[in-house]
């Protein structure tokens, strides 16, 4: 069984080549075997898992970004797009196909795609990948170097911390990643660009919506159908950066 099949069968954020401690955002230590079994059962019967296998995506997550894009019309030919927290690569695969004149997974690419993740990522043709922690200034500098002074049209972040189950510390870690993504967009995205971030309902959510409203002209919360109802995961899209002097600051 190849890596993609393992990821799709067991779920990227539950298991990826032994990196379970780094990426188990929705799993806490108290979870019983019964719950794991029911999760696995839900997962193998999930229509998006089946569709991802059929369409050659590495994870069902591709359909979350697809719905966000189809609802809001974010991706356009010729764009420079940055994918934060990109592994195993389903969002990068989706973006790569969207920037291909014929929607192909390989061949001509009309645009530029950059991606970063803590974990290794199998290459996605046409995507330039930086392996490292986005919160590390040296990793950020490597990503900045790939921008070659250009500004992004779209920044997407599916980054999620390893949740501990302690609400206040989890909220702080999620908030920190969203703030970093926003800071990156502030410095490296066109004023008319868009930022998509993953976040979680619960403490900290309303503060992050306020932060987005302070920084963007249009803010749209969106929970795509592929994001499981049971999960508190949701997404926020900010479009059109407000001038710095007009917003509350980061
Ligand atoms: N969008 C991806 C896809 O479609 O395949 C799935 C992303 S997965 C839900 C979240 C990713 O965020 C993990 O691969 C994790 O390693 C990454 N991540 C979390 N914190 C990070 C950080 N500080 N720097 C870089 N990547 C990070």
Image (cartoon, helix red, strand yellow):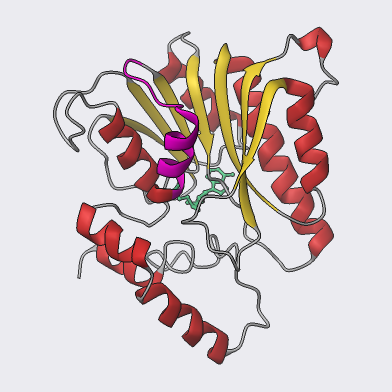
Q: Kindly tell me whether residue 118 is visible in this rendering.
A: yes
Q: Position of residue 125 (x, y in %)?
A: 22, 35
Q: How many marks?
A: 0
- Classify residue 78 as left or right of residue 133: left
Magenta residues (range): 64-78
Residue at 82% over, 21% down: 249
- Relative side of 71 to 53, left or right: right
Q: Quadrant of residue 15?
A: bottom left
Q: Nearer the viewer, residue 134 or 242?
A: 242
Q: Residue at position x 53%, y 23% from top?
A: 141
Q: Position of residue 166 (x, y in %)?
A: 79, 66
Q: Is residue 190 visible?
A: no
Looking at the rendering, which quadrant does residue 146 occupy?
A: top left
* Residue 4 screen position, x and y as percent: 27, 60
Q: Is residue 159 magenta?
A: no
Position of 220 with respect to 142 (left or right) is right
Give the answer, above or below, for where 183 lies relative to 221.
above
- Classify residue 162 by image quadrant: bottom right
Q: Main secondary structure of the magenta part?
A: helix
Give how far across and how far down residue 7 sits, in percent: 34, 64
- Residue with the most extreme front position: 71
Residue 51, above or below 33: above
Residue placed farthest to the bottom in the image? 34
Q: Is residue 106 above or below residue 163?
A: above
The residue positioned 55% from the left and 65% from the top of the image is 24
Quadrant location of the C terminus in the rendered image:
top right
User: On the picture, is 247 further left or further right than 187?
Assistant: right
Q: Residue at x 41, y 66 (%)?
A: 11
């Amino acid at each position: 069984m190849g890596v993609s099949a393992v990821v799709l069968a067991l779920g990227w954020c539950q298991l990826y080549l032994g990196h379970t401690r780094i990426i188990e955002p929705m799993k806490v230590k108290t979870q019983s075997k019964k719950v794991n079994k029911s999760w696995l059962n839900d997962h193998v019967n999930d229509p998006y898992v089946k569709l991802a296998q059929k369409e050659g995506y590495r994870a069902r997550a591709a359909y979350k970004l697809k719905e966000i894009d189809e609802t809001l019309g974010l991706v356009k030919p010729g764009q420079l797009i940055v994918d934060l927290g990109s592994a195993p690569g389903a969002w990068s695969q989706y973006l790569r196909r969207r920037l291909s004149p014929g929607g192909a997974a390989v061949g001509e690419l009309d645009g530029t795609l950059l991606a970063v993740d803590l974990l290794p990522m199998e290459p996605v043709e046409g995507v330039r990948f930086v392996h490292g922690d986005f919160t590390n200034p040296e990793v950020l500098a490597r990503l900045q170097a790939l921008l070659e002074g250009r500004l992004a049209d779209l920044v997407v972040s599916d980054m999620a911390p390893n949740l501990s189950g302690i609400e206040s510390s989890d909220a702080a870690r999620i908030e920190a990643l969203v703030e970093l993504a926003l800071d990156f967009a502030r410095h490296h995205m066109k004023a008319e660009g868009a930022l998509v971030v993953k976040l979680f309902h619960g403490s900290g959510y309303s503060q992050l919506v306020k932060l987005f409203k302070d920084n963007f002209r249009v803010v749209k919360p969106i929970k795509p159908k592929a994001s499981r109802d049971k999960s508190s995961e949701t997404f926020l899209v900010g479009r059109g950066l407000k001038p710095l002097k007009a917003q509350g600051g980061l």
